Amino acid sequence: MWFKPALSVVVATAVPDLLLFAVDRLDLVMYTMAGSLCALYGHNLPYARRARAVAGVVVAMVIGMAISLVAASLTGSTAVLIAVGALLAAGQKTLCDATRIGPPGPVIFTFVTSAALFAPQRLGQVPGHLALTLAAGAIAWLVTAGPALLRREGPERRATARALDAAAAYLAAPGHRTRHTAAAAVHVAWQTLLAAGRPTPARRALERLVVHAEAALAGGTPGSCPLAPAPGPDRLRAWARRTRARGPVPAPPAAPGTSEELFGIDAERAARHGGSRRDARRALLRSLAPGSPLLPIGARVLVGCALAGYVSQAVGVGRPYWAIVTAASLYQANVTLSWNRALQRTLGNLLGVLVFAAVLPVSRTGPLALIGFCLFFGFAAEALITRNYWLGSVAVTPMALLVLEFGGTHPAGELIGDRVLDTVIGAAAGMLAAMLVTNRRAAGRLEKALAATDRARAHAVQTLAAPQSTPAALDAARRRLTGSLVELREADDTAAGEWWQRALPQEQVLAAERAGHRTLAATATRRGSIARAPENGAV
């Protein structure tokens, strides 16, 4: 699906750009682009949730733009604007991580709102500019939600196909990492199907395919009894290809326990229907409460963006928003990942400046050429950045620089020099802040995840031992344990890449994961035996 976000943003950008071209107001492109870029979000979500998520992104974008435009209209102090930009970047990073909105995360918000901070603005213009952002956001919402009319189960099909491929990879090369990847993919597939709304025939078929992926995992566990003759990796990959395609969903023979599994899924779907939004609000509040492991990352962004902006100002850059954006874009889950991102971002931006210098003369031949280049680089950036970050950054840089041309031409040497300087300053300041602002709470998150995994496994073992365990109870226990194992692996990976960290319980984590995977296999085997009992004449 790599091309879907790229095509979405091209369509969502082209419509307002061409309308502005028709009325000879391309100087307003920056405000419509803020709304158009909302089309990048939500592509991994079922359409019902995607519509809500993208609507929330549009609202958040309008709020961020309002803060930036009002600040720009009330003060001309670069120092004040840098402080506002750093605060916005920190808040956007924290909220995106807390809501788990997914890629592209907070960097789009920071890119747009930081640029708006340094755009000439009068207070009376703010409502009109915000209306443009909202209108373009509405177009982006239609672009992202519209495919539901053509392929209602598209996101669920892709999640199921990934689960099948991951299960096939585990069967082909059994190991700790491939098993975790497969368990996580199956977990995501179930979560996607649970969030998709009422079951349809196609979703029922997808659920049966996910049951087969689980059966393959259980049957491939050393020392476990398989649920049934599980399909091999070639069959799983063939189902994955057909699931991704536009034809009907594959209809494999039902694995043992499929009907009970689907009964459990329906029960969980009904239970979630009443409390999902309330639970989501509670989880969001916990993520933002004192003691949350997200807060040190927010503080890291605040310090890094402010430092980058002030250093850029000190060396003579008039609008140091790119230094803020560069610093904000570096921050990943831990210092190690942030360092890798800094190297890729710096290399990509410097090469992107050379690309900009090459295309600038052609882009100035007319407004349609400028629009065409922006659309091309926008597509290239989104198509490449999830596959190769530094190569995607090569496309992001000329697009960002060309957007400035809509408001009027600027000396090429000044643009290129400021961008190179801001890139180097932003990367250096951002990494300095990452090393100085420690995240010791990452170890605490790991310990909590370890304890939650132990509790989930104990609950699953208790459910297994109960003589009257039902398939629905086993399914609920298994999904709870799977979710805790996914969180444990994420917490461990995050803590392992942090500097200045106390010793981590690596042996306990490995033991918990192995025990958890064995218990998952046992619950699946027990569910299959319960399902086969009536067939064997058992009462």
Image: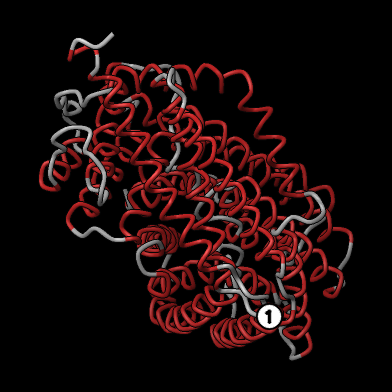
Q: Residues within 10 Å of mark 1 (few under 14, many from 20)?
A: few
Q: Position of residue 431 (x, y in %)?
A: 64, 81
Residue at (64, 43) in percent of width and height: 132
User: Which part of the image, by quadrant, shows the C terminus?
Assistant: top left
Q: Nearer the viewer, residue 110 or 207?
A: 207
Give the side of residue 435 with respect to residue 78, left or right.
Answer: left
The secondary element bearing badge 1 is classed as loop
Residue placed farthest to the bottom in the image? 315
Q: Position of residue 273 (x, y in %)?
A: 56, 19
Q: Position of residue 91 (x, y in %)?
A: 74, 56
Under mark 1, the amino acid is Trp
Q: Nearer the viewer, residue 121 or 522?
A: 522
Up/down of 211 relative to 453, above or below? above
Up/down of 221 relative to 149, above or below? below
Residue at (82, 69) in percent of width and height: 83
Q: Nearer the viewer, residue 418 or 22?
A: 418
**Which quadrant of the figure has residue 74?**
bottom right
Give the side of residue 316 with respect to residue 227, left or right.
Answer: right
**Which quadrant of the figure has residue 469?**
top left
* Figure colour scheme: secondary structure
Give the side of residue 61 with respect to residue 82, left or right.
Answer: left
Per the image, the residue denoted by label 1 is: 500
* Number of numbered markers: 1
Q: Position of residue 359 (x, y in %)?
A: 39, 76
Residue at (21, 38) in percent of width and height: 226
Q: Nearer the viewer, residue 359 or 422?
A: 422
